[in-house]
């Protein structure tokens, strides 16, 4: 019988082969067979969708994973600012998390009551780490650099790298 490890391997193969539809079909099959998806499953499926340009599918998967209790530990507060900690997440999942995080922050700013409008901080903190780790393929970690490029070029937001902590990005929403 197929278990979560077998499905994870198959979904990961779909991701590497550019077959996002098959990755989603396998994820659905897991549910039908009563096999519980884990963070590895969702990382691979999200990555397949991101690589296939299916950002809305990626966002749906992220929400589904969050409903199952995954990814929620990435969100917290730090010194009054909303914080997203991307430690341990691959780049494609990080992108989906960032889109969700910034959208949620924008919505909270828009939804602020008239009395508090303009007083809420529009900055957030995104923690990537400095990239001092070495990936399994022997390459130096590049999450911070890739996330910074994604924020500046694709999402077109203002990014500041604190000089005393290069593993953090302060983003103005």
Image (spheres, rainbow, N blue to C red):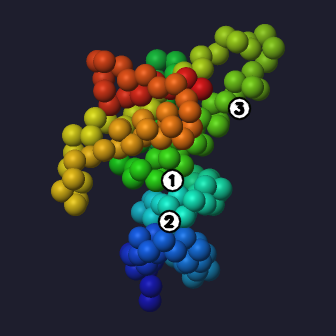
The secondary structure type at the circle numbered 3 is helix
Crowdedness of circle 1 by 10 Å Cα count: few (<14), some, many (20+)? some
Query: Residue visible at 54% across and 64% down?
Result: 52
Residue picked out by circle 2: 48
Instruction: Identify the residue at the far right of this view.
Output: 114
Residue beneath label 1, please? 70
Callout 3: few (<14), some (14-19), or many (20+) C-alpha neighbours within 10 Å? few
State which quarter of the image contains the C terminus.
Answer: top right
The Cα–Cα distance between marks 3 and 2, rounded to whole angstroms, is: 27 Å
Q: Position of residue 13 (x, y in %)?
A: 41, 75
Q: Which label belongs to residue 4?
A: none
Mark 1 secondary-structure assignment: loop
Residue 34 in sight here: no
Is 131 or 42 nearer to us in this picture? 131
| Distance from the alpha carbon under mark 2 to that under mark 1 | 18 Å
Q: Position of residue 37 (x, y in %)?
A: 50, 68
Residue contact at pointers 1 and 3, CB within 8 angstroms: no
Q: Position of residue 40 (x, y in %)?
A: 42, 63
Please name the residue shown 65% across and 56% down the image.
56
- The residues tagged by marks 1 and 3 sit, at their Cα atoms, a distance apart of 22 Å
Q: Quadrant of the N terminus?
A: bottom left
Dot 2 or dot 1: first in sequence order is 2
Tags 2 and 1 touching, CB below 8 Å: no
Work out whether 121 lies above or below 37.
above
Q: Nearer the viewer, residue 93 or 81?
A: 93
Q: Which residue is mark 3?
A: 107
Q: Position of residue 90 (x, y in %)?
A: 39, 53
Q: Is residue 103 above or below residue 25?
A: above
Left or right position of 87 against 137: right
Q: Nearer the viewer, mark 2 or mark 1?
A: 2
* Image: 68 above or below 147: below
């Amino acid at each position: 019988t197929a278990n979560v490890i077998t499905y994870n391997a198959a979904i990961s193969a779909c991701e590497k082969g550019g077959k996002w539809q098959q990755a989603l079909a396998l994820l659905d099959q897991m549910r039908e067979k009563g096999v519980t998806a884990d963070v590895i499953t969702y990382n691979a499926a999200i990555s397949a969708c991101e690589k296939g340009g299916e950002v809305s599918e990626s966002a749906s998967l992220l929400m589904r994973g969050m409903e199952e209790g995954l990814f929620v530990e990435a969100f917290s507060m730090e010194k009054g600012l909303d914080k997203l900690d991307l430690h341990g997440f691959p780049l494609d999942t990080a992108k989906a998390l960032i889109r969700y995080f910034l959208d949620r922050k924008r919505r909270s700013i828009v939804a602020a009551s008239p009395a508090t409008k303009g007083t809420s901080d529009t900055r957030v903190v995104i923690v990537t780490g400095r990239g001092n780790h070495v990936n399994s393929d022997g390459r130096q970690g590049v999450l911070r650099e890739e996330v910074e490029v994604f924020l500046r070029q694709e999402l077109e937001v203002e990014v500041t790298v604190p000089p005393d902590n290069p593993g953090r990005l302060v983003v103005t929403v």
